[in-house]
Image (cartoon, rainbow, N blue to C red):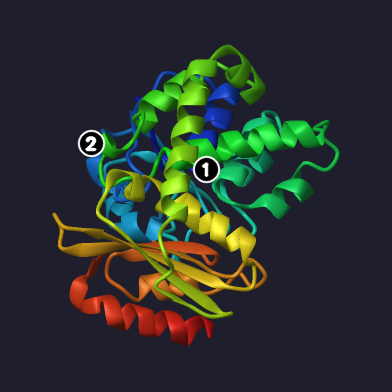
Amino acid sequence: MQIDVFNGDADGICALLQLRFAIPCKSILITGVKRDINLLSKVNAEKDDKITVLDISLAKNNHDVIRLLAQGVDIFYVDHHLITTIPKHPKLKTLINMDSNVCTSLLMNEFLEGAFYQWGVVGAFGDNMNQTVIKAVTGFCLNDRELEQLKILGICINYNAYGQSIEDLHIAPDVLYKKLSAYESPFQFIEKNPTLYQQLLTAYEADMVSASEILVDYCNDKIAVYEFPDMAWARRVNGVFANQLANKFPDRAHAILSFSVKNNAYQVSVRSPLNNKRGADELCSSFSTGGGRKSAAGINHLKKTERSLFIQRFKDKYQ
């Protein structure tokens, strides 16, 4: 049995699209919202089953990796998030690179020698790696208009992954993956499934208008902090809005705190300055539910009593 475990954002989805176009097979899909990263805890497997894991933190899933390996499962793990120690086991194959200019879709693109590079480009744009994408597609036949189309698609797929639950999203990530998997080229998807594409684009644009009306909570030339309300649009848009801010102010670090009345806590998105991609993973990992990568990271559950501590650490890291 093949089990595909993947982050529900653009990077995870586009990495899997590339792999399954190159190596087709029937598989069980396990995914979730962007912040649902302990996905391997949901996996029940038997000896000689095969598991592919894409774009979820090995550090956060280490216990289940060891559990599954002990059961005789083969694991192929591709990721770019912070990890200090990678388990060594004959049944574990890893492709992990924590460089701030690398994402899982680009790792998969390299692994497959560019066989489905357009989807790799979509995933990288979704992870806000705009300059990296331009360098990565050198030699491929993509004009400026096509690059812009792939960028917008990547942003829309990524936007769809953010939310506190599947109910916050416009379409569940596994369903979106299945719909996208009908098209070996993202341009075919845009052309032949305009209803879904336009649904995501229209919703993204509307939520971004709402986000633009939120006043900054604290700001100087080095950092900016925003606090979003407990509303579905805010939960959907906090990550892509943080990316937009990072692109607009590349010398400034950004933090967006989204409050949840239900959890009585904040969900946090952090972006390091694009001109100095460092520290977001270390900052967020200093909190129990935090993690990520050097340029972009987050905290799933920041207690109200920890808000001041987080902002102080944020200032200390980037000011």
Which quarter of the picture shows residue 191? top right
Q: At label 1, which amino acid type do we have? A: Asp
Q: For residue 197, which numbered disc appears in the image?
A: none
Secondary structure at numbered mark 2: loop
- Residue appearing at x 33%, y 49% in the figure: 235
In screen coordinates, is 108 left or right of 64?
right
Q: Position of residue 147 (x, y in %)?
A: 73, 36
Residue 22: % across, % down: 60, 24
Q: Is residue 111 left or right of residue 303?
A: right
Label 1: few (<14), some or many (≥20) within 10 Å? many
Q: Is residue 80 visible?
A: yes
Q: Is residue 55 visible?
A: no
Furthest residue toward top: 192
Q: At which x and y percent is residue 13?
A: 48, 35
Is 31 located above or below residue 88 in the figure? above
Element carrying mark 1: helix
Q: Residue at x 42, y 26 (%)?
A: 176
Residue to which mark 2 is pinned: 44
Residue at 44 percent of width and 27 percent of height:
177
Q: Which of label 2 and label 1 is nearer to you?
A: 1
Q: Nearer the viewer, residue 212 or 236?
A: 212
Q: Amino acid at mark 2?
A: Asn
Number of numbered discs: 2
| Crowd class of label 2 (few under 14; some 14 to 19; many from 20; radius 10 Å) | few
Q: Residue at x 51, y 32 (%)?
A: 201
Circle 1 sits on which residue?
11
Give how far apart the Cα atoms at labels 2 and 1 are.
24 Å
Mark 2 or mark 1: whose residue is earlier in sequence? 1
